[in-house]
Each structure stands twice: as C-alpha cells, then as structure tokens.
Image (cartoon, coloured by chain):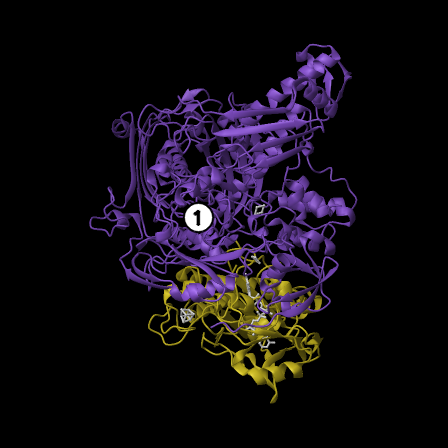
Amino acid sequence: MRTPTPHALLSLTVNGDRHVVAAAPHHSLLEVLRYDLGLTGTKQGCDKGDCGACTVLIDGEPVLACCTLAATVRPGAQITTIEGLAGPAGRLDPVQEAFDRCGALQCGFCQPGMMLSARALLNRDAAPSDTAIREALGGNLCRCTGYTQIFEAVKLAAALARGESGASIDPTPPAEGYTVLGARHRKADGHGKATGAAVYTDDFNPPRMLHAKILRSPHAHARIVRIDTSRAAALPGVFAVLTGEALPRTYGVIPWTEDETALAIDRVRFVGEEVAAVAAVDEETANAALRLIDVEYEPLPPVLTPEAALAPGAPELFPGRRGGNLTKHVRLDFGDVDAALSNADALVEGEYFFEGTAHAPIEPHCAIAEYDARGLLTLHSATQIPHYVHRTLAKTLDLPSERVRVVQPALGGAFGGKSDPFGHEIVAAKLAMMTGRPVKILLTREETFYTHRGRHPMQMHMRLAANAEGRLTGLDSKILIDGGAYSSFGLVTSYYSGQLLTAPTGFETYRFDASRAFTNKPPCGPKRGHGSVQPRFAFEIQLDKMAEKLGLDPIELRRRNDVGPDTTTVNGQRITSNGFLECLRVVEQASGWRERRGKLGFGRGLGVAGSCYISGTAYPVYPNEMPQSGVQVRLDRSGRAHVMCGASDIGQGSDSMLAYIVAEELGLRPDDIRVTSSDTDLSPVDLGAYSSRVTFMAGNACREAASALSTLVREAVASKLEVPGREVACTPGRWFWLGDPTRGMDTREAFVLAEAAHGTLGATGGYRTDKTLGGPYRGGTIGASPAYSFTAHVAEVAVDVETGFVNVKKIWAAHDCGFALNPMIVEGQIAGSVYMGWAEAVMEEHAFAYGGPNPGLLRGPNLLDYRIPTTVEAPEIECHIVQSIDPNGPYGAKEAGEGPLHPVLPAIANAIYDAVGVRLDRLPFHPWRVREALRAAGRMGGR
Amino acid sequence: MLRIAPTFTVATPTTLAEALALKATHGEKAALVAGGTDFVPNLKHGLHAPEVVISLGGLDELRGLDFGAETIALGALVGIHTLATDARIASVLPSLATAAGLIAGPQLRRMGTLGGNVCLDTRCVYINQSESWRSALGYCLKKDGDTCHVTVTGKKCVAAASNDTAPVLLSLGACVELASPRGVRTLPLEQFYVHDGARNTVLAADEILVRVLVPRPRETRRMAFEKLRVRGAIDFPLLNLALAFDLDADGVLTAPELVISAIAARPRRVRALPEGLLTDALVDRIAALAFDATRPLTNINADVEWRRDMVPVLVRRAFAAARGPQSPPFAC
Ligand SMILES: Cc1cc2nc3c(=O)[nH]c(=O)nc-3n(C[C@H](O)[C@H](O)[C@H](O)COP(=O)(O)OP(=O)(O)OC[C@H]3O[C@@H](n4cnc5c(N)ncnc54)[C@H](O)[C@@H]3O)c2cc1C
Ligand code: SF4
Ligand code: FES
Ligand code: FES
C-alpha cells in the first residue's frame, strides 16, 4: 500500500518572489504552482508532456511544469509564470498586448504556455522569421485558433518590442452606419486571458474541498454482477463512495432518448464507462480507494461496428429496447429520386467513410459541486450548456430546480464536447450532498476521451444524377452511423446527416436513409459541424466526380446548381440571405483557380468545396414556448452597462459580441461593459453554445434589450437638447444632436438624465424562433434554422508521392457570416474551423482495438497517440468574409463558428485528385492510405 | 491529474560520488532522473514505483562538451537543445545536431538530456499508457503481465528503442562511460544496447552514465539523420535512421554505416553494405539491403507495411542530405 513520504520544504523563486512550500516529493512543479502557490495561470491539458499548456520559463527557457518534479528544480532557479510576464503596475508585456490585439486569445487555455514560449523566442530573436515562430511554438498545442492569429500576434509583439506601433494590424473601421460594429475590437475577456487571471473551473479551489475520482469499466460490454465498496470506504481519507443505484434516474440531452445514468447500473457498455466514484482528501487517496473497489463482471460479447450491431442476433446493448441496437432510423423522400436516377445523363456513385474524431479541447472536463445546509446546490463546470446541466441535476438528484445553480467559469475549449450533461457532474453534486463538502472532479486527458461525444463515424453511399446541361436531378444517400453506447444527440445527428445537405448546391429530388446504431464504444455526439460534416465530405467529392464526368469546371457545376437566396430547398428549409456565389467567386479569384488548377504539375493540386450551416435551430431541445435566449441589460449613472445572458462563451467570443452590441446601441466603449454570462442564478436563460445559435439568438435578444434602453436615453437627451429624439445619436463616449454634433454630452451624463427621467434603467430582450420554419413532415423541423451561413474553400496540396504525406499548403476560405460584428473574431472562427477540418482530414482518428485481448479498448487515449496538429505543419489560411446581411440576424449577422469547417475535408480530397489523380474516399488521409491508393493506381512515380 | 503514487523521496546530490553512493545503497529501488521528460510521464503511468528518486541535475561533473583531437566527449547532462544548436556540434557531428533538433518539441529539448536520451526507456503502444488502461488490456510482458500483444507468441518484449540520438551515436562508433562505486568502464554503444524491450541496456543497478565519447570523424566523413513522423514537432520517431560514410575526392564511398531504429528494442546496424562509386545505383542497393533488414512491428502507432516501405525512402533521403544541404524534415 501507500508508504507516506514526508513533505520537504522547497524554496522556489517564482516571478521574482521567494516562496517556501512544503511539497510532497511526488508533486510536479505544475501542482505546486497551481495548488500550493495559487498561480493558476499555468494550465494543465495532459499532465504528461504532450500539450505544452503547462509551459513556464526557468531561467528564461521554456519548460514543462507537468514533467518536472518540484523537488528537482535547481535551487535559485528563476521561474516565470504568466502572472509574472506583465511589467510593473501590470503593464502588459508586448506579447500579451499583441495576443490580445490580434484576437489570438480564443478560449485562452493554451495561451499562457504559448505566450511564454513566444516570450522566450523574442528574448533570443527580436525579429523571428515565420519558420522560427512555427518552430518555437511547436510544443504548444492550440485547438481554437488554427494558429493563424497566434503567428500574427508574435510578429506584432516583436514589432511592439522594437518600439514600432504595430500598424501592420488591420485597423478596420466600424461598418457603414455603425460606431462600434464591424470594427476590430479586443475581446471582452482578452485581458484576463492575456494575464492568466481568467478563472477556469480547475482554478477554483474552495476550502475543505474533497477530490473525487471515478472507477471505470475495463470491459466493452459486461454485466455487473456485484460491487463491493467496503474496502474503499474503510480507507483513511475517504469520505464517500458512490455506485449507480444511488443515482437511478436516467437522463440525456434529448428528452426523447434519456438512456444514460451517471454511474452504470447492472451493465457497462464501453471501456471507460463510469462504474463507481470516491470522494477523498486528495486525488492520490481517491485513486488508491478506487483500487479497493471490487467489481465482479460477467463479460458479454461486444458489438463494435454498426454493421455488427444491426446484424440479426447481435448482442443487445439495451435488452428489451424497442428497435434493439438501432438508435434511430430516418428515411425521407422528396420527389421521385428513382426516376431521376434512371433518367440521368450522368450518374456518380460512391462509397465514403468518415472516421470518428475527438474534440480534444486543451482543457479537460472539470466540475466542482458545493451543497450547503439550506439545500442549495452549486455546480461550477466546464460545460457549454449550463441550462441543460441545471435541468439534469434537478432531475437526477430530485432537487427542485430553484435549489440548483450552475455556473460555467472561463472555458478552455469545447467544440461540442461539453454540450451534454455528464455523469461526472452529477457524481460531483451527489458526493457534495453526501459529504457536505465541496467536491472537485477533474478528469484526466484519458477520461476525456471516454467522455467523448465526438464525431460519429459514418459509412455513406451516395448516388448523384445530373442531366446533360449539368443540372443535378437527384441524390440518393444512404448512411450508416456508429453511435457508440448511448443516444446523446444521436436523434438529431441522424436527421442532420441528411437535412443539411440540400444547399448551397441543390438537386431536384432527394432521398436519404440514415440509421444510427449503438455500439460498445464511448458515445458519439456533436462535434463542430454536428452531423453534417460527414455527408458534406461525401457529397462535395461526388460533385467533383460529377463535374469531371460532365466535363465541367467544379466551380461552374456548383454555380449552375446554386439554390440562391430567398428560396426553399428540396426538403423544405427556408433560405433567406445567401452569399454562396460570392464566396465561390472570392476563392476562385484568390486562389488563382482558373490559371492554376490542373496546371501545377504532378504532386500539386487545387480542390474546391462548398457548404451551408444553421444559425441555431428553430426549435429548442425540449419543447416549450419560452424564449431560446434571454438578455438583461442594466445601466446606471456611473456611465456603465451590465449585460447578463445565459449564453456560454467557450472562447468563440459571445461575451464580446454582447458587449459590442450594447456599446453600439448605448454610446459606450466595449470596455465599459461588464458581462455576466452562463450563471443560472444571475443570467437569464440561454440554451447554450451549440448549433451555432448564440450570435443569432443572444445577439437579437441583446439588441432588443439594448435598443429599449437606447430609446430611453435618447428621449432624455432629446428633451435636454430640445431636439426631436430621432435626431439624437450616439458614438462611444458621447450622445449628441445630429443637426449639430457639437451639441451633446458624454454618455455618463446622458445616463444620468435618463435615470432621472425614467427611474432605474434596465431592460430585457428575448429571442423566439419563427415556429413556421421547416418542412411539413415528420422531422421537417430538424435542421430548420432562421438563417444559414455559406462557405466555399479552395485547398492547395502537395502530395509527397514517395511517403504519401499530404502537405496542405494553403486554404483560401470564404465565409458568408451575414455581417461581421467583429471581423477579427469571425476570422478567428474561420481559421479555427479550417484547422479542425484539416486536422481531421490528414491525421485524426479515434482508433479502437477491434481484436486482441480486449476488443473495444480505445487505442492511445492521450494527446501523443491521438495526434492533433502543431504549429509546424499548420497550413497557411487566408480568410475572406462575405457579408450577405441577413434580414433576421442581429444587424444582419449569422453564424461563423461551425460552417467554415465543412468544406475543408472534401476540398483537400478534391485537391489530392487534382494533384495525383487518385480519389481518397476514406478518412483520414494517412500517408499509408495515400501511398496505397497511389500504388493501386500505378501512380507512384519515380522509384 | 495523473497523480504519481507517493512511494518515494527525492535526493538531490551535488557530486557524482554522492549520487553513486545513494545508488549503491538503494540499488534497483533508486531511480535516476535527469531532465525527467521520459521518467516523469512513466511514473505517472505507474511504470515505476521507486523508493528514492535521485536527481542528477546538480552533478556538474556530468556537464560539458569537450572537443578533443581524437574524441569528442559529451557530458550526460548536456541538453538536447544544446546538441541541436551548438555550432561546433553542427559542424563536426551534423547528424547528431539534426537528430537532436528533431527530438520532441522545444520545451522538452530544453529539459531533456543526452544521458536521458541514450538511456531512454523503450516504447510501445501497449505500455506507454495509464495503469488502468494497461489493466484493462491485461498488462504485458514488459510489466506486470505475461504476454506480448505485439508478437503474441514471443517471450521477449520488443518495445521500440525510440531515442533519436541512439542510431546517430551508433553510426559514429560512440562509446559510453559508465561510473559506479566499482570504478568507470567504457563500453562501445553497440554493446550497451541489448535485444530486450523490458530493459534494453546493460546499465547496472549501481551505474550512472557519465559521458558519451564520439571519435572525431575524419574530414572525409559524411553523415545524415532521417526521421519519420506525422507531425513536425513533439512526435517520437515512427522510424529513424543514421547514415555515415567516407567519400573521397573521386566520389568513392567507403566504410558506410547505417543504423535503423524505432523498430524493436535495439537499434539495428545494417551490415555488409557495399562500397564503391557513389551512384544512384549504389544508393538503391543500400536502400534495398536496408529494406530487407527491417521488419517493423505493431509496437508503434503507424502502419507497419508503410513504415517498412519508408526505409528505402529515408535511406535515399539520407544520402541526399549527406551529400548536399540538409533536406527539410518529414511532416505532412
Ligand atoms: C511528448 C514527448 C515527445 C518526445 N519525443 C521524443 C523524440 O521525438 N525523440 C526522442 O528521442 N525522445 C523523445 N522524448 C523523450 C525525451 O524527452 C528525450 O528522449 C529526452 O532526451 C530524455 O532525456 P531526459 O533527461 O529528460 O531523461 P529522463 O526522463 O530524466 O531519463 C530517462 C531515462 O534515462 C535514465 N537516465 C537519465 N540520465 C541518466 C544517466 N546519466 N545515467 C543513467 N541513466 C540515466 C533515467 O533513469 C530514465 O530511465 C519525448 C518525450 C515526450 C514527453
Ligand atoms: S512489445 Fe510486447 S511486451 Fe513489450 S511493451 Fe509492447 S506489448 Fe508489452
Ligand atoms: S500539461 Fe504539461 S504538457 Fe500538457
Ligand atoms: S485558444 Fe488555444 S486552445 Fe483555445
């Protein structure tokens, strides 16, 4: 058993301050900095050297705190953490300043480490080359930015440090008719993220806190015969042990398919499923206690592919469930597809496979629960859906919802991976209720791979028909979806795999048939571009093949079949604004498509693809008549505004978006606005950061609230100036008469007048969807959105024919986001999406053991085996914003966070075809697959 | 977090003698740590449970580069970053500089040491995982189990030597200097590595690696290192190889050395290589011999056939690099 080792007194110099800490010998420098010294700016993403989040400087050199035993730090070493980067009086280091100004701080979780690596680089090279920057940051993984804005920031930092103003950064002015919107602003949370002050869930350490750990199933499929927790409960330092019976209520994000329990009851359905939990004084004791829990399993045969799951006689995951292992089957027919296929002048048939992938945000899941004597439960959690977590806690713990509070602190990336209520959140809450103490649960990187909800693997068969004029007459799509062990969002996924394919390139008739099967693997869910990235991959390659068959340029084929604006698609989705043709034109021109495609020589090529995506769904996840998003704005005589909204800022910038809107409407600088978001006690309900709904819905709600207040202020100002209200306008810091702008007052004074005239100033806004949206058939409302974004990409690749490596040189990305409230943030979303799609194309794979001693075991659940790209190989990304000004979007805005991912993968596949003449219809494009395809096609070239 | 089991105390000796004494007292129960970049992740995975961890960081005797007329002596504590960036190394031992520059990422190169790299534990997709993962697998020969999931029937662990400096140092005929309370012994690196993934060196329980001695290469010596990996940073090798040969003014190649690693427990020296006028045909013959000599296994997370096919590709690239300016590293 554990041999207790004495703590040793360590003397550490951190940021110039000398600290003496009593540290256990097995503690890493990361633990000492974060938990003993409270310097929580240094982050933990993998805890074993794979991600760089824990980078600190020792004597000016970047090192990983997680791989350094604190006791081995050389006495006298100067340690610098992000908290020590700023100069006297908190003056930001040029690196921090530049990262903030360039929008590089999305979720911000990777950035303390990134900024320290950048600082070390600039210390030795005042004017680093692009290559030097990429090399120096190669050990710092970022999942949000695609690295583009980070590279810009490092260059800006170098310029600032040299005393230049950094004028290289594009100072876009506000859009025509606006005073704030359309310009490049810093993010509302930028300063906190630049300095390390932003508080993420694991940075929060209430006194008397216990640590929980979860025992997980070693079997892909087994019956739980018996669990004996007595030995664990008896271990000194253990406060509570929990098993599934104590939490019997099922839950799930979709109310129609609630099939999860917080801890497994009777049966485990994947390796890594939660079986029991322990709360103890520290994680080491909790881990030791887990080993004392005796579980007797009766292993059952696992089903690991959807084909196996749906075969007759297959072992069932939910015995007795109607439908067996078939989670959901959707079949929809629009027009006579069979006639279109048989009358086609050209027919393209293809079989595609999209591999499962993980979100891999750099921040692992974490939750902290507190329960007080009055029966109030508070959960801080790394979630992107506090509202659904709130509902789930109330349900599973049998608490009235008014006794539950869910708070989402700063979030270190999510991408859809934090949009289900999770077992570990319920477990932390239950353990807090049992022990009366705060309970923290921090998942290891490996556990985040089991929590999963990643991209569904899909096997797709498509037949596409066209006539001789190049009009697409029909699409027949059949999709088999690997769902993993639970439903999660699967019902929606099944629909999205068909419903979101009918624009921007339309077809006259359509049939899709999608089946989602349960398998004994971690549950799949929504990953950026939920459900539609996979069929988009298949379809856009189909288009490329069709263009070749018809002898048409692939861009021309798309033009001929563009659905256009103000129309209804074949499956009944209402399209309003549509900037797709403009997106195509932009990337065609920027990439030199006409001059270069097909002419770059063997090994190099260009490919194009397009897509559309929803800006929120017309219908909430659970049916109700309330607004999908609520915002409350408060002003007062101090000249400041406070905006409250349930929306989750997951790094995408929704807090900033709210601030810009309030600033625009009320004559404030974005800095003058305080945002309180995603706290179910303090902010009105918003359903969460999923389906790309936040800008559209919370933005509209915010505009409604802010403009109501604006009317009050305007009236007060007008009456003071004795001019008509419609002649009064504002600009950040000032309200004035349009007739003579010198007549006016500063904003504070305007608010004083308004408060005097109208009393305490506050207003609410809410967004409700038009409930007439969607097709008039069962499922027709799924995929119905108040507005759709459009995207076109061109990718340029160089294929190394000898090795099979696909080197993506550059991606030109054009995205119609309606209106860019802040182009810098939109570009960050485009670049981040492009990066994520490219990563899925060339390397990412959620790989399982399908044979061997333990089929169903996830291979390499860590950031070394599950490779996500570094700065070194990241492609150049050129972002173009297209603005179609949507009639219903806030100021014309639509989504930008998910759409731009879709075309990346097929554009790369099509570019590979242009480069070397082979089709890759199976993801990812591992070099061995590429080489195999080249060999099969006899195109190895050379030796 | 990945909590380390609290089984040990940390000792921070400041002299080699002190460190050797500690090692002598605790034997196998004492573990050495230099940069910690291999040792600490392995601790977190429960691969070791030492009673004492001896930190070598304070041993100045293990530092320093010495460029002698005959021998270049590299201290065990010399940092990987130093190897990658030192101008003298780059000019005299360019393949070592290349290899060092391709190890892991920038932070790990600043923490990692030559000694730690030379003594790096072997790696395998079935062993470099958490305790609970390995337990779900049923463990394996290398630790706590009785089967090998790579060879299935074999009785010896074949985890892969994954240290990038090893093939280079072997190709340069390096020796290691090992100190123990019994004295100092110098061993050709070829005899240091053995064919057992469970423990692929002959380092004794009371020994510490002090220096690596590299014979100063002749003026005519050409050398190169190639590494296969998916990402341009962080990744361990999926395959690596080091090449060295003499090339005279007439373009005749003699005394070729080719060492291939990241395959099995011991870097493999390809023997009986042909000499002669350095032509594409000669390169192709050597590449074919290298291919024949290499049998990649499923111990590494990449397709086995592909890795084998990459052997001749890397050999040709190594020749190109040895002849001309360094070619860029592999990456997608
Ligand atoms: C994400 C990641 C990626 C990596 N990528 C690579 C890579 O691409 N290529 C590569 O080669 N390595 C890689 N490494 C491994 C490692 O960083 C390097 O090999 C490094 O050089 C090891 O040196 P160290 O000083 O940190 O070793 P330590 O971790 O301190 O020690 C490693 C082993 O050597 C022993 N040891 C150390 N010094 C001595 C000595 N003087 N005498 C006797 N025994 C000693 C230790 O006891 C231990 O068993 C990677 C590591 C990580 C975490
Ligand atoms: S090679 Fe075999 S015995 Fe060695 S670590 Fe891998 S699975 Fe285990
Ligand atoms: S937390 Fe240290 S490298 Fe990931
Ligand atoms: S900003 Fe880099 S991981 Fe989020």
**Res. A139 image quadrant:** bottom right
Residue B331 rendering spot, x and y as whole percentages: 53, 55
Horizontal side, residue A429 vs residue B215: left or right: left
Q: Position of residue A150 (x, y in %)?
A: 63, 45
Q: Is residue A535 above or below residue A369?
A: above
Q: Position of residue A255 (x, y in %)?
A: 36, 37
Answer whether residue B160 is visible to the viewer in this image.
yes
What is the residue that sits farthest to the left in this orientation?
A313
Residue A307 in percent (x, y) is at 27, 48
Q: Chain letter for yellow?
A: B
Q: Which image quarter: residue B133?
A: bottom left
Please tell me which residue lies in front, A453 or A367.
A367
- The picture's colour for chain A is purple
Taking the image as shown, residue A744 lies to the left or right of residue B18, namely: right
Above or below: residue A117 compared with residue A107: below
Q: What residue is drawn where x is 29% and y is 53%?
A: A303
Relative height, residue B203 to residue A630 (above, below): below
Crowd band around label 1 with a 10 angstrom C-alpha radius: few (<14), some (14–19), many (20+)? many
> Label 1 lies in what chain?
A
Regarding ligand 2, which quadrant of the image does it lie in?
bottom left
Give the labeled residue for mark 1. Answer: A426
